[in-house]
Image (cartoon, rainbow, N blue to C red):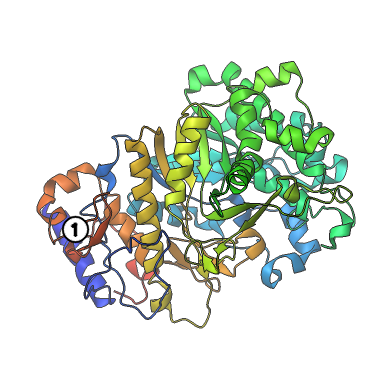
Amino acid sequence: MKLLGRRLLLLGFFLILQGYVVLGNYGVHMKSFGLHKVDRNADPLSPSFGINVLNRTSFPQGFVFGSATSSYQFSRLSNWDYFTHKYPGKVVNSNNGDVADDSYHRYKEDVNLLKEMNTDSYRFSISWSRLIPSGKISKGVNEKGIQYYNNLIDELLANGLTPAVTLFHWELPQALEDEYGGFLSPKIVKDYLDFVNLCFERFGDRVKFWITFNEPHSYSVGYDNGLSAPGRCSPWLNNNCTVGDSGTEPYIVSHHQLLAHAYAVQLYRRKYQAHQKGIIGMTNNCDWMVPLTNSSLDQRAARRSLDFMYGWFMNPLVYGDYPRTMKAIVGDRLPKFTPKQSKLLRGSYDFHGLNYYTAVYASHAINPPNRTHARYSTDNHADLTATRQGVLIGEQAGSDWLHSYPKGLWNLLLYIKRRYKNPVIYITENGIDEVNDASLPLEQALQDNYRIQYYYRHLQFTHKAIKNGVRVRGYYGWSLIDNFEWLNGYSVRFGFNFVDYNTLKRYRKLSSYWFIIFGARQQYWMNNSQHAEAGPSRSNGDGYVVEGHEAFLTQSFFSGALTVPASRFCPHDF
Protein backbone atom coordinates (compact mmCIF):
# COMPACT_ATOMS: atom_id res chain seq x y z
CA MET A 1 0.00 0.00 0.00
CA LYS A 2 2.98 2.31 0.50
CA LEU A 3 3.87 1.96 -3.18
CA LEU A 4 0.24 2.63 -4.10
CA GLY A 5 0.24 5.70 -1.88
CA ARG A 6 3.30 7.09 -3.64
CA ARG A 7 1.62 6.55 -7.02
CA LEU A 8 -1.47 8.39 -5.86
CA LEU A 9 0.56 11.26 -4.47
CA LEU A 10 2.58 11.56 -7.68
CA LEU A 11 -0.58 11.56 -9.77
CA GLY A 12 -2.06 14.22 -7.52
CA PHE A 13 0.98 16.45 -7.88
CA PHE A 14 0.97 15.86 -11.62
CA LEU A 15 -2.67 16.90 -11.96
CA ILE A 16 -2.00 20.04 -9.95
CA LEU A 17 0.90 20.88 -12.24
CA GLN A 18 -1.38 20.42 -15.23
CA GLY A 19 -3.91 22.89 -13.84
CA TYR A 20 -6.54 20.39 -12.67
CA VAL A 21 -7.36 22.39 -9.55
CA VAL A 22 -10.84 23.15 -8.31
CA LEU A 23 -11.66 26.65 -7.10
CA GLY A 24 -15.25 26.80 -5.92
CA ASN A 25 -18.26 24.56 -6.46
CA TYR A 26 -19.27 22.94 -9.73
CA GLY A 27 -22.62 21.43 -8.86
CA VAL A 28 -25.11 19.99 -11.33
CA HIS A 29 -27.98 22.33 -12.05
CA MET A 30 -31.14 20.46 -11.14
CA LYS A 31 -33.59 22.66 -13.04
CA SER A 32 -32.45 21.25 -16.35
CA PHE A 33 -31.57 17.78 -17.51
CA GLY A 34 -29.00 19.24 -19.89
CA LEU A 35 -25.40 20.19 -19.25
CA HIS A 36 -23.78 23.46 -18.39
CA LYS A 37 -22.65 25.32 -21.46
CA VAL A 38 -19.32 24.09 -22.74
CA ASP A 39 -16.78 26.70 -21.71
CA ARG A 40 -13.23 25.82 -22.58
CA ASN A 41 -11.98 28.74 -20.50
CA ALA A 42 -13.67 27.57 -17.30
CA ASP A 43 -11.58 26.10 -14.51
CA PRO A 44 -11.43 22.33 -14.95
CA LEU A 45 -13.45 20.12 -12.64
CA SER A 46 -11.76 17.97 -10.07
CA PRO A 47 -10.99 14.44 -11.29
CA SER A 48 -12.88 13.43 -8.12
CA PHE A 49 -16.12 15.12 -9.21
CA GLY A 50 -19.04 13.47 -7.41
CA ILE A 51 -17.26 10.29 -6.38
CA ASN A 52 -18.13 10.77 -2.70
CA VAL A 53 -21.75 10.17 -3.74
CA LEU A 54 -21.55 7.87 -6.77
CA ASN A 55 -18.78 5.45 -7.72
CA ARG A 56 -18.24 1.81 -8.67
CA THR A 57 -19.24 0.59 -5.22
CA SER A 58 -22.67 2.24 -5.60
CA PHE A 59 -23.57 -0.45 -8.16
CA PRO A 60 -24.31 -4.13 -7.56
CA GLN A 61 -21.38 -6.49 -7.21
CA GLY A 62 -20.38 -7.81 -10.63
CA PHE A 63 -21.71 -4.78 -12.50
CA VAL A 64 -19.55 -4.32 -15.61
CA PHE A 65 -17.96 -1.00 -16.53
CA GLY A 66 -16.34 -0.73 -19.92
CA SER A 67 -15.62 1.35 -22.98
CA ALA A 68 -16.20 0.73 -26.66
CA THR A 69 -15.02 1.33 -30.21
CA SER A 70 -15.82 -0.14 -33.64
CA SER A 71 -13.57 -1.76 -36.21
CA TYR A 72 -13.92 0.62 -39.19
CA GLN A 73 -11.11 2.65 -37.67
CA PHE A 74 -8.70 -0.02 -38.89
CA SER A 75 -10.41 -2.25 -41.51
CA ARG A 76 -10.63 -2.15 -45.28
CA LEU A 77 -12.57 -3.80 -48.13
CA SER A 78 -15.91 -3.03 -46.49
CA ASN A 79 -18.95 -1.20 -47.83
CA TRP A 80 -17.95 1.85 -45.76
CA ASP A 81 -14.48 1.91 -47.27
CA TYR A 82 -16.08 1.89 -50.73
CA PHE A 83 -18.76 4.42 -49.73
CA THR A 84 -16.38 7.04 -48.29
CA HIS A 85 -14.30 6.98 -51.46
CA LYS A 86 -17.18 6.90 -53.95
CA TYR A 87 -19.24 9.57 -52.14
CA PRO A 88 -16.70 11.71 -50.24
CA GLY A 89 -19.13 14.64 -50.09
CA LYS A 90 -21.47 12.70 -47.78
CA VAL A 91 -18.90 12.70 -44.98
CA VAL A 92 -17.82 15.93 -43.26
CA ASN A 93 -14.61 17.26 -44.83
CA SER A 94 -14.60 14.20 -47.14
CA ASN A 95 -12.94 12.19 -44.35
CA ASN A 96 -12.52 8.41 -44.45
CA GLY A 97 -11.29 5.67 -42.14
CA ASP A 98 -8.25 4.59 -44.12
CA VAL A 99 -5.92 5.12 -41.16
CA ALA A 100 -8.10 6.65 -38.41
CA ASP A 101 -6.60 5.78 -34.99
CA ASP A 102 -4.49 2.89 -36.32
CA SER A 103 -5.62 0.64 -33.49
CA TYR A 104 -4.50 -2.27 -35.66
CA HIS A 105 -0.89 -1.48 -34.72
CA ARG A 106 -1.55 0.28 -31.40
CA TYR A 107 -3.90 -2.17 -29.72
CA LYS A 108 -1.55 -2.85 -26.80
CA GLU A 109 -1.39 0.86 -26.06
CA ASP A 110 -5.19 1.11 -26.16
CA VAL A 111 -5.62 -1.95 -23.94
CA ASN A 112 -3.30 -0.34 -21.41
CA LEU A 113 -5.44 2.81 -21.49
CA LEU A 114 -8.46 0.65 -20.67
CA LYS A 115 -6.73 -1.13 -17.83
CA GLU A 116 -5.56 2.09 -16.23
CA MET A 117 -9.09 3.50 -16.45
CA ASN A 118 -10.22 0.71 -14.09
CA THR A 119 -12.65 -0.72 -16.61
CA ASP A 120 -13.71 -4.37 -16.64
CA SER A 121 -14.45 -4.89 -20.31
CA TYR A 122 -13.74 -3.69 -23.83
CA ARG A 123 -16.45 -3.75 -26.46
CA PHE A 124 -15.12 -3.90 -30.01
CA SER A 125 -16.36 -5.16 -33.36
CA ILE A 126 -14.93 -7.81 -35.65
CA SER A 127 -14.71 -6.76 -39.27
CA TRP A 128 -16.31 -9.33 -41.57
CA SER A 129 -14.24 -8.05 -44.48
CA ARG A 130 -11.01 -8.43 -42.51
CA LEU A 131 -11.68 -12.11 -41.81
CA ILE A 132 -13.39 -13.01 -45.10
CA PRO A 133 -12.49 -10.36 -47.72
CA SER A 134 -14.81 -11.87 -50.34
CA GLY A 135 -17.64 -12.24 -47.84
CA LYS A 136 -17.94 -15.93 -48.69
CA ILE A 137 -16.11 -18.46 -46.58
CA SER A 138 -15.82 -20.80 -49.57
CA LYS A 139 -13.41 -18.30 -51.11
CA GLY A 140 -11.02 -18.35 -48.20
CA VAL A 141 -10.24 -16.91 -44.77
CA ASN A 142 -7.66 -14.24 -44.03
CA GLU A 143 -5.57 -15.89 -41.32
CA LYS A 144 -3.73 -12.62 -40.63
CA GLY A 145 -7.08 -11.12 -39.67
CA ILE A 146 -7.77 -14.07 -37.38
CA GLN A 147 -4.37 -13.60 -35.78
CA TYR A 148 -4.97 -9.91 -35.16
CA TYR A 149 -8.17 -10.59 -33.22
CA ASN A 150 -6.53 -13.47 -31.36
CA ASN A 151 -3.77 -11.09 -30.30
CA LEU A 152 -6.26 -8.43 -29.19
CA ILE A 153 -8.40 -10.91 -27.23
CA ASP A 154 -5.36 -12.45 -25.55
CA GLU A 155 -4.00 -9.02 -24.66
CA LEU A 156 -7.32 -8.05 -23.07
CA LEU A 157 -7.49 -11.23 -21.02
CA ALA A 158 -3.87 -10.89 -19.94
CA ASN A 159 -4.78 -7.49 -18.52
CA GLY A 160 -7.88 -8.72 -16.72
CA LEU A 161 -10.34 -7.27 -19.25
CA THR A 162 -13.35 -9.09 -20.66
CA PRO A 163 -13.79 -8.94 -24.45
CA ALA A 164 -17.31 -8.02 -25.60
CA VAL A 165 -17.57 -8.64 -29.33
CA THR A 166 -19.93 -7.07 -31.86
CA LEU A 167 -20.25 -9.21 -34.98
CA PHE A 168 -21.78 -6.60 -37.29
CA HIS A 169 -21.20 -2.88 -36.82
CA TRP A 170 -22.42 -1.70 -40.25
CA GLU A 171 -19.43 -3.09 -42.17
CA LEU A 172 -20.31 -5.47 -45.01
CA PRO A 173 -17.81 -6.97 -47.46
CA GLN A 174 -18.24 -4.90 -50.61
CA ALA A 175 -18.19 -8.08 -52.69
CA LEU A 176 -21.56 -9.12 -51.23
CA GLU A 177 -23.00 -5.68 -51.91
CA ASP A 178 -21.89 -6.01 -55.52
CA GLU A 179 -23.07 -9.60 -55.94
CA TYR A 180 -26.61 -9.50 -54.56
CA GLY A 181 -27.21 -6.18 -52.78
CA GLY A 182 -26.12 -7.20 -49.30
CA PHE A 183 -28.94 -7.13 -46.77
CA LEU A 184 -31.50 -6.43 -49.47
CA SER A 185 -31.26 -10.13 -50.34
CA PRO A 186 -32.18 -13.16 -48.21
CA LYS A 187 -28.91 -14.68 -49.44
CA ILE A 188 -27.14 -12.59 -46.83
CA VAL A 189 -28.38 -14.83 -44.01
CA LYS A 190 -26.31 -17.83 -45.13
CA ASP A 191 -23.13 -15.80 -45.63
CA TYR A 192 -23.60 -14.04 -42.29
CA LEU A 193 -24.02 -17.39 -40.55
CA ASP A 194 -20.78 -18.66 -42.08
CA PHE A 195 -19.01 -15.55 -40.79
CA VAL A 196 -20.35 -15.76 -37.23
CA ASN A 197 -19.71 -19.50 -37.11
CA LEU A 198 -16.07 -18.77 -37.92
CA CYS A 199 -15.97 -16.26 -35.06
CA PHE A 200 -17.60 -18.63 -32.58
CA GLU A 201 -15.22 -21.39 -33.65
CA ARG A 202 -11.99 -19.38 -33.53
CA PHE A 203 -12.66 -16.98 -30.66
CA GLY A 204 -15.46 -18.50 -28.57
CA ASP A 205 -13.12 -20.32 -26.20
CA ARG A 206 -12.19 -16.87 -24.83
CA VAL A 207 -15.07 -14.56 -25.86
CA LYS A 208 -18.15 -14.97 -23.65
CA PHE A 209 -20.14 -11.89 -24.68
CA TRP A 210 -21.49 -11.69 -28.23
CA ILE A 211 -23.56 -8.99 -29.93
CA THR A 212 -24.97 -10.06 -33.29
CA PHE A 213 -25.82 -6.60 -34.64
CA ASN A 214 -25.08 -3.08 -33.49
CA GLU A 215 -27.90 -0.60 -34.10
CA PRO A 216 -29.69 -2.37 -36.96
CA HIS A 217 -32.04 0.62 -36.90
CA SER A 218 -29.23 3.01 -37.89
CA TYR A 219 -28.07 0.67 -40.64
CA SER A 220 -31.60 0.29 -42.03
CA VAL A 221 -32.36 4.02 -41.93
CA GLY A 222 -29.39 4.52 -44.23
CA TYR A 223 -31.63 3.10 -46.95
CA ASP A 224 -34.19 5.81 -46.22
CA ASN A 225 -31.94 8.86 -46.52
CA GLY A 226 -28.99 7.55 -48.53
CA LEU A 227 -26.53 9.28 -46.20
CA SER A 228 -24.63 6.14 -45.20
CA ALA A 229 -23.33 3.03 -46.92
CA PRO A 230 -24.35 1.84 -49.44
CA GLY A 231 -25.89 5.22 -50.33
CA ARG A 232 -29.31 4.06 -51.52
CA CYS A 233 -32.60 5.99 -51.27
CA SER A 234 -35.49 7.11 -53.46
CA PRO A 235 -34.05 9.30 -56.25
CA TRP A 236 -36.79 11.90 -55.68
CA LEU A 237 -35.09 12.81 -52.37
CA ASN A 238 -32.20 14.35 -54.35
CA ASN A 239 -29.58 12.99 -51.94
CA ASN A 240 -27.30 11.88 -54.76
CA CYS A 241 -29.18 8.59 -54.81
CA THR A 242 -29.60 7.07 -58.26
CA VAL A 243 -31.20 3.84 -57.02
CA GLY A 244 -33.25 2.77 -54.03
CA ASP A 245 -36.71 2.96 -52.49
CA SER A 246 -37.02 4.76 -49.15
CA GLY A 247 -40.49 3.31 -48.61
CA THR A 248 -39.54 -0.37 -48.83
CA GLU A 249 -35.80 -0.98 -48.58
CA PRO A 250 -35.35 0.04 -44.91
CA TYR A 251 -37.94 -2.58 -43.95
CA ILE A 252 -36.41 -5.28 -46.16
CA VAL A 253 -32.93 -4.68 -44.77
CA SER A 254 -34.15 -4.74 -41.16
CA HIS A 255 -36.12 -7.93 -41.84
CA HIS A 256 -33.03 -9.74 -43.05
CA GLN A 257 -30.96 -8.45 -40.14
CA LEU A 258 -33.54 -9.84 -37.72
CA LEU A 259 -33.57 -13.22 -39.44
CA ALA A 260 -29.77 -13.34 -39.56
CA HIS A 261 -29.72 -12.55 -35.84
CA ALA A 262 -32.24 -15.28 -35.01
CA TYR A 263 -30.37 -17.95 -36.96
CA ALA A 264 -27.06 -16.84 -35.44
CA VAL A 265 -28.47 -17.21 -31.92
CA GLN A 266 -29.88 -20.62 -32.83
CA LEU A 267 -26.46 -21.67 -34.15
CA TYR A 268 -24.66 -20.47 -31.03
CA ARG A 269 -27.10 -22.15 -28.67
CA ARG A 270 -27.08 -25.46 -30.51
CA LYS A 271 -23.37 -25.75 -31.24
CA TYR A 272 -21.36 -23.61 -28.84
CA GLN A 273 -23.12 -22.18 -25.80
CA ALA A 274 -23.17 -25.30 -23.63
CA HIS A 275 -19.39 -25.71 -23.59
CA GLN A 276 -18.24 -22.13 -24.27
CA LYS A 277 -20.66 -20.76 -21.66
CA GLY A 278 -21.15 -17.35 -23.26
CA ILE A 279 -24.16 -15.10 -23.76
CA ILE A 280 -25.54 -13.56 -26.94
CA GLY A 281 -27.89 -10.72 -27.83
CA MET A 282 -28.49 -7.71 -30.06
CA THR A 283 -27.76 -4.03 -29.42
CA ASN A 284 -30.42 -1.49 -30.38
CA ASN A 285 -30.33 2.28 -30.16
CA CYS A 286 -33.16 4.54 -29.12
CA ASP A 287 -33.75 8.21 -28.38
CA TRP A 288 -36.21 8.94 -25.62
CA MET A 289 -39.36 10.51 -27.07
CA VAL A 290 -40.86 13.35 -25.02
CA PRO A 291 -44.37 14.48 -26.05
CA LEU A 292 -44.14 18.08 -27.24
CA THR A 293 -47.37 18.88 -25.39
CA ASN A 294 -49.65 17.03 -22.99
CA SER A 295 -52.20 16.42 -25.73
CA SER A 296 -53.26 12.85 -26.40
CA LEU A 297 -52.17 13.25 -30.03
CA ASP A 298 -48.61 14.12 -29.04
CA GLN A 299 -48.49 11.37 -26.43
CA ARG A 300 -49.53 8.82 -29.05
CA ALA A 301 -46.98 10.29 -31.46
CA ALA A 302 -44.24 9.71 -28.87
CA ARG A 303 -45.30 6.09 -28.31
CA ARG A 304 -45.58 5.53 -32.05
CA SER A 305 -42.09 6.93 -32.57
CA LEU A 306 -40.73 4.53 -29.96
CA ASP A 307 -42.35 1.68 -31.87
CA PHE A 308 -40.81 2.79 -35.16
CA MET A 309 -37.33 3.18 -33.65
CA TYR A 310 -37.04 0.60 -30.87
CA GLY A 311 -40.05 -1.66 -31.20
CA TRP A 312 -39.14 -2.27 -34.85
CA PHE A 313 -36.51 -4.69 -33.53
CA MET A 314 -37.43 -5.38 -29.91
CA ASN A 315 -40.98 -6.47 -30.64
CA PRO A 316 -39.86 -9.34 -32.92
CA LEU A 317 -37.22 -10.43 -30.40
CA VAL A 318 -39.66 -10.50 -27.49
CA TYR A 319 -43.01 -11.22 -29.13
CA GLY A 320 -42.11 -12.63 -32.56
CA ASP A 321 -43.66 -9.90 -34.72
CA TYR A 322 -43.51 -6.20 -35.57
CA PRO A 323 -45.49 -3.68 -33.47
CA ARG A 324 -49.15 -3.37 -34.40
CA THR A 325 -48.68 0.33 -35.11
CA MET A 326 -46.08 -0.45 -37.76
CA LYS A 327 -48.18 -3.16 -39.37
CA ALA A 328 -51.21 -0.88 -39.49
CA ILE A 329 -49.36 2.07 -41.04
CA VAL A 330 -46.77 0.44 -43.29
CA GLY A 331 -49.08 -2.31 -44.52
CA ASP A 332 -47.82 -4.41 -47.43
CA ARG A 333 -44.50 -2.57 -47.51
CA LEU A 334 -43.59 -4.30 -44.24
CA PRO A 335 -42.33 -7.89 -44.77
CA LYS A 336 -44.03 -10.68 -42.84
CA PHE A 337 -42.52 -13.41 -40.71
CA THR A 338 -43.58 -17.01 -41.26
CA PRO A 339 -44.78 -18.89 -38.16
CA LYS A 340 -41.43 -20.70 -38.08
CA GLN A 341 -39.48 -17.46 -38.27
CA SER A 342 -41.64 -15.86 -35.60
CA LYS A 343 -40.97 -18.77 -33.24
CA LEU A 344 -37.24 -18.58 -33.98
CA LEU A 345 -37.13 -14.85 -33.23
CA ARG A 346 -39.12 -14.96 -30.03
CA GLY A 347 -36.72 -15.16 -27.10
CA SER A 348 -33.59 -15.10 -29.29
CA TYR A 349 -31.49 -13.25 -26.73
CA ASP A 350 -29.78 -13.68 -23.39
CA PHE A 351 -29.61 -9.92 -22.89
CA HIS A 352 -30.50 -6.69 -24.66
CA GLY A 353 -27.84 -4.15 -25.52
CA LEU A 354 -28.98 -0.52 -25.39
CA ASN A 355 -27.28 2.49 -26.96
CA TYR A 356 -28.61 5.77 -25.57
CA TYR A 357 -27.36 9.27 -26.30
CA THR A 358 -30.17 11.80 -26.49
CA ALA A 359 -33.88 12.66 -26.51
CA VAL A 360 -36.26 14.55 -28.80
CA TYR A 361 -39.72 16.07 -28.65
CA ALA A 362 -42.40 14.21 -30.59
CA SER A 363 -45.62 15.71 -31.90
CA HIS A 364 -48.41 14.47 -34.11
CA ALA A 365 -47.70 15.29 -37.75
CA ILE A 366 -50.23 17.86 -38.90
CA ASN A 367 -49.72 17.04 -42.57
CA PRO A 368 -50.26 13.37 -43.46
CA PRO A 369 -47.40 11.60 -45.28
CA ASN A 370 -47.31 11.73 -49.06
CA ARG A 371 -48.52 8.29 -50.16
CA THR A 372 -46.96 8.72 -53.57
CA HIS A 373 -43.59 9.37 -51.97
CA ALA A 374 -43.71 6.97 -49.03
CA ARG A 375 -40.61 6.69 -46.86
CA TYR A 376 -39.66 5.25 -43.49
CA SER A 377 -38.92 8.61 -41.84
CA THR A 378 -42.49 9.87 -42.31
CA ASP A 379 -44.30 6.58 -41.70
CA ASN A 380 -44.43 7.24 -37.95
CA HIS A 381 -46.79 10.19 -38.57
CA ALA A 382 -44.77 12.26 -36.11
CA ASP A 383 -42.61 15.35 -36.18
CA LEU A 384 -39.42 15.09 -34.14
CA THR A 385 -37.57 18.17 -32.93
CA ALA A 386 -34.96 19.14 -30.36
CA THR A 387 -36.68 22.41 -29.40
CA ARG A 388 -39.86 23.47 -27.64
CA GLN A 389 -40.80 27.14 -27.76
CA GLY A 390 -37.30 27.90 -28.95
CA VAL A 391 -35.55 26.12 -26.07
CA LEU A 392 -33.36 23.06 -26.67
CA ILE A 393 -34.30 19.84 -24.90
CA GLY A 394 -30.74 19.68 -23.57
CA GLU A 395 -27.34 21.26 -24.01
CA GLN A 396 -26.07 21.02 -27.58
CA ALA A 397 -23.14 18.64 -28.08
CA GLY A 398 -20.72 18.59 -31.00
CA SER A 399 -23.07 16.64 -33.27
CA ASP A 400 -26.23 18.44 -34.32
CA TRP A 401 -28.40 15.46 -33.30
CA LEU A 402 -27.01 15.12 -29.76
CA HIS A 403 -28.46 17.04 -26.81
CA SER A 404 -27.84 15.94 -23.25
CA TYR A 405 -30.99 14.59 -21.57
CA PRO A 406 -29.87 12.15 -18.84
CA LYS A 407 -33.35 11.55 -17.44
CA GLY A 408 -34.27 10.05 -20.81
CA LEU A 409 -32.07 7.05 -20.07
CA TRP A 410 -34.03 6.36 -16.91
CA ASN A 411 -37.34 6.85 -18.74
CA LEU A 412 -36.23 4.47 -21.48
CA LEU A 413 -34.99 1.79 -19.09
CA LEU A 414 -38.31 1.82 -17.21
CA TYR A 415 -40.19 1.71 -20.52
CA ILE A 416 -38.22 -1.36 -21.61
CA LYS A 417 -38.87 -3.03 -18.27
CA ARG A 418 -42.62 -2.56 -18.60
CA ARG A 419 -43.01 -3.12 -22.34
CA TYR A 420 -40.51 -5.91 -22.95
CA LYS A 421 -40.68 -8.21 -19.92
CA ASN A 422 -37.84 -6.70 -17.91
CA PRO A 423 -34.90 -8.23 -19.80
CA VAL A 424 -31.28 -8.21 -18.69
CA ILE A 425 -29.80 -5.01 -20.16
CA TYR A 426 -26.28 -3.85 -20.88
CA ILE A 427 -25.93 -0.18 -21.78
CA THR A 428 -23.51 -0.78 -24.63
CA GLU A 429 -23.02 2.86 -25.66
CA ASN A 430 -23.51 6.21 -23.97
CA GLY A 431 -21.45 9.31 -24.56
CA ILE A 432 -21.12 12.89 -25.74
CA ASP A 433 -18.93 14.63 -28.29
CA GLU A 434 -17.43 18.05 -28.88
CA VAL A 435 -16.49 19.81 -32.09
CA ASN A 436 -12.92 19.06 -33.13
CA ASP A 437 -11.44 22.55 -32.88
CA ALA A 438 -7.93 22.37 -34.30
CA SER A 439 -7.16 25.88 -33.05
CA LEU A 440 -7.44 24.88 -29.38
CA PRO A 441 -4.22 24.39 -27.40
CA LEU A 442 -3.91 20.78 -26.31
CA GLU A 443 -4.26 21.74 -22.64
CA GLN A 444 -7.72 23.16 -23.31
CA ALA A 445 -8.78 20.28 -25.55
CA LEU A 446 -8.16 17.90 -22.66
CA GLN A 447 -10.42 19.78 -20.22
CA ASP A 448 -13.77 18.12 -20.91
CA ASN A 449 -15.91 19.18 -17.92
CA TYR A 450 -19.11 18.59 -19.90
CA ARG A 451 -18.17 14.95 -20.56
CA ILE A 452 -17.63 14.26 -16.86
CA GLN A 453 -21.01 15.82 -16.08
CA TYR A 454 -22.68 13.89 -18.90
CA TYR A 455 -21.37 10.53 -17.67
CA TYR A 456 -22.02 11.34 -14.03
CA ARG A 457 -25.66 12.26 -14.64
CA HIS A 458 -26.33 9.25 -16.88
CA LEU A 459 -24.73 6.92 -14.36
CA GLN A 460 -26.92 8.48 -11.65
CA PHE A 461 -30.04 7.67 -13.66
CA THR A 462 -28.72 4.18 -14.44
CA HIS A 463 -28.29 3.64 -10.71
CA LYS A 464 -31.79 4.95 -10.08
CA ALA A 465 -33.23 2.56 -12.69
CA ILE A 466 -31.53 -0.38 -10.97
CA LYS A 467 -33.13 0.71 -7.70
CA ASN A 468 -36.44 0.71 -9.60
CA GLY A 469 -35.97 -2.94 -10.52
CA VAL A 470 -34.52 -2.64 -14.03
CA ARG A 471 -32.02 -5.44 -14.59
CA VAL A 472 -29.08 -3.39 -15.86
CA ARG A 473 -25.88 -5.43 -15.65
CA GLY A 474 -23.29 -3.19 -17.29
CA TYR A 475 -22.39 0.19 -18.78
CA TYR A 476 -20.01 0.99 -21.67
CA GLY A 477 -18.97 4.57 -22.40
CA TRP A 478 -18.51 5.67 -26.00
CA SER A 479 -15.74 5.90 -26.74
CA LEU A 480 -12.33 4.87 -25.48
CA ILE A 481 -10.53 7.22 -27.88
CA ASP A 482 -11.49 9.86 -30.41
CA ASN A 483 -12.15 8.17 -33.74
CA PHE A 484 -13.75 8.35 -37.18
CA GLU A 485 -17.41 9.09 -36.44
CA TRP A 486 -19.12 7.87 -39.60
CA LEU A 487 -20.86 10.80 -41.36
CA ASN A 488 -19.17 13.29 -39.05
CA GLY A 489 -15.72 12.00 -39.95
CA TYR A 490 -13.12 13.58 -37.67
CA SER A 491 -15.12 16.78 -37.12
CA VAL A 492 -16.22 15.68 -33.63
CA ARG A 493 -14.55 13.89 -30.71
CA PHE A 494 -16.28 11.36 -28.45
CA GLY A 495 -13.27 9.89 -26.67
CA PHE A 496 -12.27 9.66 -23.04
CA ASN A 497 -8.81 9.97 -24.52
CA PHE A 498 -7.64 12.51 -27.10
CA VAL A 499 -6.00 11.40 -30.36
CA ASP A 500 -3.65 13.71 -32.25
CA TYR A 501 -4.59 12.77 -35.81
CA ASN A 502 -1.22 13.97 -37.10
CA THR A 503 0.90 11.78 -34.85
CA LEU A 504 -1.80 9.35 -33.57
CA LYS A 505 -0.52 9.84 -30.03
CA ARG A 506 -3.06 9.35 -27.26
CA TYR A 507 -3.52 11.87 -24.42
CA ARG A 508 -5.75 11.45 -21.41
CA LYS A 509 -8.64 13.90 -21.14
CA LEU A 510 -9.85 15.00 -17.73
CA SER A 511 -12.80 12.58 -18.08
CA SER A 512 -10.34 9.70 -18.38
CA TYR A 513 -8.78 10.66 -15.04
CA TRP A 514 -12.28 10.97 -13.58
CA PHE A 515 -13.18 7.46 -14.70
CA ILE A 516 -10.00 6.11 -13.10
CA ILE A 517 -11.28 7.31 -9.73
CA PHE A 518 -14.93 6.46 -10.36
CA GLY A 519 -14.04 2.90 -11.34
CA ALA A 520 -11.70 2.18 -8.43
CA ARG A 521 -12.24 -1.26 -6.89
CA GLN A 522 -13.82 -2.03 -3.51
CA GLN A 523 -10.46 -2.41 -1.77
CA TYR A 524 -9.52 1.16 -2.66
CA TRP A 525 -12.69 2.60 -1.13
CA MET A 526 -12.27 0.50 2.01
CA ASN A 527 -8.75 1.83 2.45
CA ASN A 528 -9.71 5.42 1.63
CA SER A 529 -13.13 5.79 3.21
CA GLN A 530 -12.08 8.97 4.98
CA HIS A 531 -11.40 10.60 1.61
CA ALA A 532 -14.68 9.38 0.13
CA GLU A 533 -16.49 11.21 2.91
CA ALA A 534 -14.37 14.35 2.70
CA GLY A 535 -16.00 17.65 1.85
CA PRO A 536 -19.58 18.77 2.36
CA SER A 537 -22.24 17.57 -0.03
CA ARG A 538 -25.88 18.43 -0.28
CA SER A 539 -28.58 16.44 -2.03
CA ASN A 540 -31.89 17.63 -3.38
CA GLY A 541 -33.55 14.51 -2.02
CA ASP A 542 -33.15 12.29 -5.05
CA GLY A 543 -29.48 11.61 -4.52
CA TYR A 544 -28.26 14.23 -6.97
CA VAL A 545 -25.49 16.27 -5.45
CA VAL A 546 -25.78 20.00 -5.92
CA GLU A 547 -22.50 21.12 -4.41
CA GLY A 548 -19.36 19.91 -2.69
CA HIS A 549 -18.11 17.63 -5.49
CA GLU A 550 -14.52 18.72 -5.11
CA ALA A 551 -12.22 16.36 -3.23
CA PHE A 552 -8.53 15.89 -2.68
CA LEU A 553 -6.61 15.29 -5.88
CA THR A 554 -4.57 12.67 -4.06
CA GLN A 555 -7.63 10.42 -4.23
CA SER A 556 -6.68 9.74 -7.85
CA PHE A 557 -6.06 6.08 -8.41
CA PHE A 558 -4.30 3.74 -10.84
CA SER A 559 -5.07 0.03 -10.57
CA GLY A 560 -1.49 -0.88 -11.45
CA ALA A 561 1.87 0.49 -12.46
CA LEU A 562 1.86 3.20 -15.10
CA THR A 563 3.63 1.13 -17.74
CA VAL A 564 3.06 3.56 -20.62
CA PRO A 565 5.04 6.82 -20.42
CA ALA A 566 2.85 9.51 -18.89
CA SER A 567 4.00 11.98 -21.53
CA ARG A 568 2.05 10.01 -24.08
CA PHE A 569 -1.21 10.81 -22.35
CA CYS A 570 -0.54 14.24 -20.92
CA PRO A 571 -0.17 17.75 -22.33
CA HIS A 572 3.40 18.10 -21.05
CA ASP A 573 6.23 15.75 -20.23
CA PHE A 574 6.29 14.78 -16.58
The answer to whether residue 375 is left or right of residue 91 is: right
Q: Position of residue 414 (x, y in %)?
A: 44, 37
Label 1 residue SS = strand
Image position of 294 with respect to 197: above or below:
below
Other-residue count near label 1 (Cα within 10 Å), few / some / many at <14 / 14–19 / ≥20? some
Q: Is residue 159 visible?
A: no
Q: Nearer the viewer, residue 189 or 151?
A: 189
Image position of 453 with respect to 38: above or below:
above
Q: Residue furthest front?
A: 295
Q: Is residue 225 visible?
A: yes
Q: Position of residue 487 (x, y in %)?
A: 67, 62
Tell me the amino acid under the disc marked 1. Answer: Arg
Count of residue discs = 1
Image position of 213 with respect to 347: above or below:
below
Q: Position of residue 376 (x, y in %)?
A: 76, 47
Rendering quarter of residue 9: bottom left
Q: Position of residue 556 (x, y in %)?
A: 23, 60
The answer to whether residue 315 is left or right of residue 48 is: right
Q: Nearer the viewer, residue 157 or 282?
A: 282
Residue positioned 65% across, 23% down in the render: 320
Quadrant where the image shows the C terminus: bottom left
Residue positioned 14% across, 57% down in the render: 5
Which residue has dot 1 on it? 538
